[in-house]
Image (spheres, grey):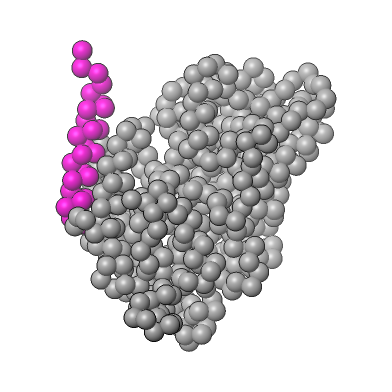
Amino acid sequence: MRMKIRTWLALVSLTAALMAGCVQRVPPEQATAPVTGSAAVELVLYTWTEVTELQANQALVTEFEQAHPGVKVRIQNVPGSREAMQKLQTMFSAGEPPDVMSLHGAYYLPFASKGVLADLEPLIAQDPDLNLADFYPRLVELCRWQGKLYSLPRYTSVLALFYNKAKFDAAGLAYPGSQSPWTWERYLALCKQLTRDTNGDGTPDEWGAYIDFWDTRLYPWLWQNGADIMNAERTRCTLDSPAAIEALTFVRDLRHRHGVCPPTTAGERNEGLNMLMQEKVAMFMTGPWDVQTLLQKPTLQWDVAPLPARKRAATLLGTENYAIAAASKHPQEAWELYKFLLSAHSQEFMAEKLDKMPSRKSVAEGSYLTAPAKYSRQVFVDALSYAQAVPNIPEWDEVAHYVKDAFDRIWVGTQSVEGALRQATREVNEALAKARRGPSW
């Protein structure tokens, strides 16, 4: 079985699953940036980034400290979203939470539902500097829990189709999405035309596409076909619907029927991106978080296109949420740091340095689009109009393994699509019913 980090609401991607491969990892001994000098107030900023983003965050923190001479900010960084969120839970349990923290969107609800995050709206109401209206409204809604706003997105992300322009040029094919309608059928036709046996041994060694057959990378296919993971009320799983079965059958057939994508390698977390960079695949679904890695190979000719559609256009909408601890000992200073990190200035800086996709409209539709870039950022911005968030529920960690295991069985071919999805749906709904009844005593 594949050892990828699966996510719910970009459960550990999108993003996140993010920043792997060619990006240098932070050594454990460097995970916490040192504090120098003395200050009346010390704030802890908790993050889960790789070294390049840690350095960019430190540059912003230095700028903040220069404008607030009585405050020092210590960055506590744990690379890897799952590991970081587990440690953060421990810090809250021990009564030692950070003042400001980055939360992967997949893990936001468990924190919000426990009441450990500060309600932001009273702070926003008293301070017009933040300008909530500048954030995309759909992103803001993802940050609410039971009507209250406990976080805001510092960045956003969407899944798009990254493709090798040189391979399309050599085959004399139009780029993906350039011809309307951009459908599953047209996508399949391109995959077939771009799958090649270059050494004549009877087995393809270049493929039209790479498929990540795991939750967040599959959800857009479901949505495009009118299916969903949960019902509208979030009371039951609906992966056994005919539309869901049809969608995943199409994706599974790319490997088992059409042979236009390679079998995946167990334990290789970043295989799809690596194969795109090695020019072994022509198309790969991923997001803005992989741009920096691709730019490390300047000879690679690539761009991004929208995902193909069937009944409707759809892609995954993800966030990296920033929150303030309700128990912060320095709430006013924490709020000042929070505003600075989510400011238009900071988002412009991170877009320029690391290609982070802004969550503010003024930045995303302003300097982010007008700045020179090797790829079409317009594709990302346009996708915000039809991107969809996973219907997150606080209990998902308790049941997600049923879905993961079903997807694995489908992909390796040990169970039919219909059989696996019906089994997973039954198991999820039984586990949800038990979890929501609470302990029986």
**Could you say which is closer to the camera, residue 84 or residue 363?**
84
Which segment is the magenta one? 417-441
- From the viewer's perspective, tell me whether residue 271 is left or right of residue 377: left
Residue 300 is situated, as x and y percent measured from the top left of the image, at 60, 71
Residue drawn at (46%, 65%), measured in percent from left and top? Answer: 284
Compared to residue 400, the image places residue 89 above or below, namely above
Residue 222 is situated, as x and y percent measured from the top left of the image, at 31, 56
Q: Residue furthest top?
A: 441
- From the viewer's perspective, tell me whether residue 438 is left or right of residue 107: left
Q: Quadrant of the C terminus?
A: top left
**Could you say which is closer to the camera, residue 40 or residue 361?**
40
Q: Residue furthest bottom?
A: 172
| Residue 427 counted in the magenta span | yes
**Could you say which is closer to the camera, residue 138 or residue 30?**
30
Compared to residue 412, the image places residue 26 above or below, namely above
Residue 19 is situated, as x and y percent measured from the top left of the image, at 56, 50
Residue drawn at (52%, 52%), measured in percent from left and top? Answer: 157
Chief SS of the magenta region: helix
Residue drawn at (62%, 57%), measured in percent from left and top? Answer: 292
Please say whether residue 196 is visible from this viewpoint: yes
